[in-house]
Image: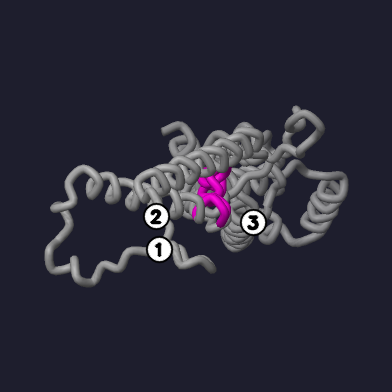
Amino acid sequence: MPRRDRMFVFLTAFLIALSFLPKPPARQTIEVRERVIGGLSDSPRLYSLALGDPRLVQIRRQILNYGHSKPAAALGMARWQAETAAIYAQRTNELAVDPTTIDRPTLGSITPVIPVSFTNQAKTIDLVGYWNQVDEQARGHLLKLETVWRQQQATIGPPPVRLGNVTQPLLSGTNLGYAALIAFLAMLLMAVWIRVQPPRRLVGASAEDMQAISTKREQSQGKSSSQSENQLPVILPAAWIRLRQPIGVHLRKIVYVGLFATAVGCWTI
């Protein structure tokens, strides 16, 4: 099989196989920046992951949750204390305005809290003022903790990881390997076909061939006249002769044209 034919069959089969193999999944670019003094570095490192990769899903979730950490336990405790103090302050204020707002069935179960000292004289406490003061202190403490927490969240800055554009790669290592294997098998099959049914060609006579023809002519002259009449060596120009190729050769030409047309059509549509 001529080298030109081998290259033609290999390239066309390679392109056709690439077009029919499943395309690799789309990939998304990931930019990773290192933290430096004053922010993030200006030269990110680029990576890419397939859209269906679980690592990409996890990175996307971490970016969405970045800067939204849960409040500290002290902030949760301060919120609970503020809510409790607000309930008690509201209730004592309502009782101070209208003592009848309390449910009658629970009057007998209410025991006033009276501080006890070493003296026999009981002290009275202004519950309204006490719970209002507790409520005010609890809200101030909660506001202070929330302000500190918001400031901490603001100083975190942008995430060091950012998702870039989504690209659709045309080639992959796996597809190139499969396409090369298919193209090699096609080239091998074509080489076997040409060897089994080669094309007919006129070959110019070499010096050895001319010497053999002269020898045969001399031998024929020494034979009887009856034998020499049936043998006539003739040398003709190649343009005077037309060879009729086998049907397999014409079919192989059609296959060449079909391979070329298919390869062009697969990559232009």
What residue is at 44 percent from the left and 36 percent from the top? 265
Taking 218 as reference, is 158 above or below it? above
Q: Name the secondary structure under disc 1.
A: loop
Whether residue 114 sits left or right of residue 160 in the image: it is: left
Q: Is residue 76 left or right of residue 111?
A: right
Are circles 2 and 1 on residues that touch, CB within 8 Å? yes
- Measure how far apart labels 1 and 3 are at the Cα level: 89 Å
Q: Is tag 1's residue or tag 3's residue first in the polypeptide sequence?
A: 1
Q: Which mark is residue 177?
A: 3
Seen in the picture, residue 33 relative to 211 is either above or below; the reply is above
Q: Is residue 244 visible?
A: no
Q: Earlier in the sequence, mark 3 or mark 2?
A: 2
User: Taking 61 as reference, is 99 left or right?
Assistant: left
**Residue 44, image x, y percentages:** 73, 34
Q: Which residue is mark 2?
A: 124
Question: Does the segment drawn in magenta span residue 61?
Answer: yes
Q: Amino acid at mark 1?
A: Ile
| Residues shaded magenta | 60-76
Total residue callouts = 3
